[in-house]
Image (cartoon, rainbow, N blue to C red):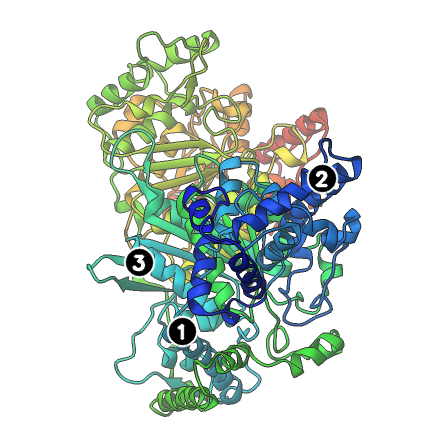
Amino acid sequence: MAQNDESTVRFWGRFHGPNMGYVEEQYELYKVDPQAVDPSIKEIFDQYGAPIWMHQRQISMQEGSAVPSENDVKRLTSAMKLVEAVRRFGNLEANIYPVGRNKNRESSLVDPNTYGLTEADLQQIPASWLWEKAPSHVENGLDVIKELRKYYTGTITYEYDHVNSQEEREWLLEKIETEHATVSLSADEKKQLLARLTDVEGFENFLQKTFVGQKRFSIEGLEAMVPMLDHIVKYASQDKIENIMMGMAHRGRLSVLAHVLGKPIDKIFSEFHHSPNKELIPSEGSKGINYGWTGDVKYHFGAVREVTGGDVATTKIMMAHNPSHLEFVNPVVEGIARAAQDERTEPGYPTQDVTKAIPVVIHGDAAFIGEGVVAETLNLSGLPGYKTGGTIHIIANNLVGYTTDQEDGRSTTYASDLAKGFEIPVIHVNADDPVACISAIKLAYEYRQAFHKDFLIDLVGYRRYGHNEMDEPRVTQPKLYEQIDQHPTAANVFASKLVDEGVIVEADFAKMVENREKELKHIYDSMSEQDASKLEPQFMPDALNHDLSEFETAVPLEVLDNLNEAINARPDGFKQFKGLNRVFKRRKNILDEGSFAEWGAAEALTYATILHEGIPIRITGQDTERGTFAHRHLVLHDADTGEKYCPLHHLPEVKASFDIRNSPLSETGVLGFEYGYSIHSPETLVIWEAQFGDFSNAAQVIFDQFISSARAKWGDISNMVMLLPHGYEGQGPEHSSARLERFLQLSAENNWTVANVTSAAQFFHLMRRQAALKGREEARPLIMMTPKSGLLRSQRIASTAEEFVHGKFEPIRNQPNLKVSKKNAKRLIIGSGKVMIDLEEELEKSEEKYDWLRVLRMEQIYPFPKKELLQELKQLPNLKEIIWLQEEPKNMGAWQFVHEYLRELLEGEQKLRYVGRPDRSSPAVGEPNIHRIEQNQIILEAINPTIGGDSE
């Protein structure tokens, strides 16, 4: 309470003479121990603070001199520096380490001696001079320092000086320094918290004893994580938030699945092999969880749980599946959350409601600072196309990364320091103090709800066993594990505290431990066993074997005309960049008889028709609004004002959003985000475009661990599209190949479609087929090689209106402009992509009739179009050889994938030959002239009547 408050002044004005001395004596006792004075007197000091005359006496001492001395000023400024130092650097002395060499840290930055101050100096300075909102019992500078040290150097501490928003900083300071950031629990709530810790510890102990030597990445040392997550669920449920999207790596995952996600414990037990030839089976009635047909190890799986509040509001908790590539689930979770927040049923950009979902991501301490995907994902947090209204981050800090010490794993003081660059407030909290841990969650949640920004909690504990319970940590961290071996568990630490407080007696805690052990043993004993040899292997769903040719993708001309007219309309007063006038003038007439739609116009029509059918679209990538090669122009900028206009936001009678965004310069983070978006919103056609196709290799983990295999491992279904510009144009190694061979190497079990189309109409029909897969069992991703600048405006890949109005996607396509006699054909050339356009040009230039030649374009490489190719081969009775033509080196491109399929199709004396560049370590040459020479040699070799090339 302020010392000059009118009621305070009036109250203390009643005391005179000896009474004043008695009150002063009582107040000195109260300052040391509030319980040492009579309760009625304590109530007075609680309400009115220190006797006002004591405060006035202190001020008069300071004001005795008309002009402050130089020492007075220096003492005051030094004290102000010390106060700010405690706020900024108190964390360096905070009691946040349960074990380890940092357990009893000291820092000169918060030592009064560093600032030339003594306790006497601080006592002479009124508290209000240093702390405007100091509590009533804080009288002088020394009291200020002691009080602030309680907030900043205890088992919980804060870092927010790096936050540039004054509003946020004041909000945080107010919460922290008025104790509103601290949770106060009743005796019953403390007992419940202890019971929760006991449940978690008992679960881990049971696993350790029952499944000896099995990997489980236990939570022990970080048990407080479970009640922390409990409270997030509690707060979100109270606020009627629909979704909590969780992502975490291995540490503690089984405990979180069991206690927070409600995964049946017998199901978890069943995932441990009881013996080499037996498998545990959950008891009858246990809730099953469906995964993919190949499955995964138990600590990679996620789960879903619904929590129903008292008024029937439901909050769904979803933990995403995650591979061993630790932090790569981060952007996936953010994409899932954004998909849950977006409303996509109206034209324009989706309407986002950040209160519909909260992302919660649990990180490893070594991985948080070590994996670049973390920084990529944090960078998404404030971007319009990717923000999710604030993520609650928790670092599960066990002080060591596998066997690597902190000094070898990071260059920063804390694992959390990366977050400072993104102005994310940080709390460090000791995992042995569960009440402080819950306080941290409360502040994080309230900040997220107030400012819709990220918040990070560094939960500092330890790892009781080795990284995976199978390795021996004492080999590499002997001193640390000497301490851990002697350190009581979190439940024991908290139980001892509650015994001291008189909340429980020791027997209460012993009973909790005993009951948990009995409960788990009963679950285990209720399970049955069966011979592992009798278990049936799982197979992929029949739907993935279905032929996708059943989908009709043609669009009536009238619909195309109306949509094209809307695409080329502009609002009144909009001043289009004059360099685009010719482009759009040409696009107005693309559906006229005798006209052709080049790639950019056809792409716009493709998206327009999909939107017209009520299917939302999200397309992102670096420079995607305009297109890397200046071909798309789906977001226009007024030449005078810079105001944006997207024609696809203004299509007639459309009830679906078109979310087109330029992404940050990120592949891993953005692709992971889009993948997450696609699995949560299967009704949306999600598209990611690489700036150049080979840039996608920066996101290889997302392709390998998620997009290509998630359906088989986890049952996650996605029909997202990846557009990868691909084709050799003499632009060097990094601007030629989209590394087609890598996607083909990952192709199996119809996990995705890999295509390399060579006409605008083929793109049109294939994308429309992909959109039609929405929400169906047949759905799978699409990897599409797309043209670059050399082809995008070429009439050779342009299409007539007739090709959009009729037909569908063709996995095998005839080479245009080549008249052949199938009966006379002796050589069949098969190829894919831009090289087939180059071949077309060469055939046209030549005076040779080529009546002995048949040429096919393989537009879909996977699934391999065996049926269509067989039909073609049956029509070539005199065929002598098949040539696979490609521009990529022999050890790259499609050759290594297709040659086995093609060899199986050979009959009699027929031969299979490869024509293309030889094996190379680099995808392409860097000199344009050499490229042209090589390209020309490849084409001429393919059409030379003399047999050449490499035979199979």
Q: Which mark is residue 77?
A: 2
Q: Badge 2: few (under 14), some or many (20 or more) residues near its Cα, within 10 Å?
A: some
Q: Is residue 912 visible?
A: no
Kind of residue at disc 1: Ala
Closer to us: 589 or 407: 407
Residue bearing mark 3: 237
The x, y position of residue 341, in whole percent, is: 34, 44
Question: Is residue 778 visible in the rendered structure shown here?
Answer: yes
N-terminal label among 2 and 1: 2
Percent x, y for residue 192? 39, 75
Marks 1 and 3, Cα distance to the nearest angstrom?
Answer: 19 Å
Q: Mark 1 or mark 3: name the one nearer the start of the chain.
A: 3
Other residues around mark 3 within 10 Å, as few (<14) / some (14–19) / many (≥20): many
- For the residue pair 333 and 252, the one nearer the viewer reads as 252
Tag 2's secondary structure?
helix
> Which residue lies most toward the front here?
17
Q: Nearer the viewer, mark 1 or mark 3?
A: 3
